[in-house]
Image (cartoon, rainbow, N blue to C red):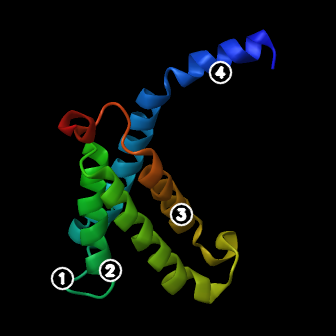
Amino acid sequence: MTTTNRNLDARLTSYAPAILSLYRVVFGLLFLCHGSALLFGWPSGPAAPAGQWPSFYAGVLEFVTGVLITVGLFTRIAAFIASGVMAFAYFTVHLPKGFVPLINGGELSVLYCFGFFLLIFTGAGAFALDARRR
């Protein structure tokens, strides 16, 4: 490895905790919006009828885990649940239409599933309520 590469690696690595926090916040907010759309019809509607399986319950899980992940509270547990919700969505809604996510419309479910899977192992980053609780 050249000196330039080592310097670049060291410089970028120093920002990793902050960038991980930014990643978590953006991912959490996007997921929260999916949940609020299912629960409240905002920012796009209509809302799922209360108690409708699985849309309403998915909305509750997406909204609650989205809030927790956004603020970085119980991030690993919330990410585990959110990852499972998205895996369930892929296997029950998209996989019956075909295996390839780009064809069956499940690419967003797969991306969310693995994005949250990453947060299970990395944690919330430097700027999170989890970091303050320690």
Residue 108: mark in rendering: 3
Mark closer to the chain start, 4 or 2: 4
Q: CA distance from mark 4 to mark 2?
A: 44 Å
Q: Amino acid at mark 4?
A: Asp
- Categorize mark 2 by other alpha carbons within 10 Å: few (<14), some (14-19), many (20+): some
**Residue type at numbered disc 2:** Ser
Q: Residues within 10 Å of mark 4 (few under 14, many from 20)?
A: few
Quadrant hosting residue 25: top left
Q: Which residue is mark 4?
A: 9
Circle 2 sits on which residue? Answer: 55
* Closer to us: 72 or 91: 72
Q: Is residue 37 above or below residue 8?
A: below
Which label number is shown at residue 66? none
Q: Position of residue 50 (x, y in %)?
A: 18, 82
Q: Which of the two labelled residues, at mark 2 and mark 3, occupies the earlier sequence position?
A: 2
Which of marks 1 and 3 precedes in the sequence? Answer: 1
Quick one: quadrant of the N terminus? top right
Q: Tell me the number on the disc at residue 50.
A: 1
Given the image, on which type of amino acid does mark 3 rest? Answer: Leu
Q: Earlier in the sequence, mark 2 or mark 1?
A: 1
Q: Secondary structure at mark 4?
A: helix
The residue lying at 31 percent from left, 59 percent from top is 78
The mark closer to the camera, 4 or 2, is: 4
Disc 2/disc 1 C-alpha distance (Å): 9 Å
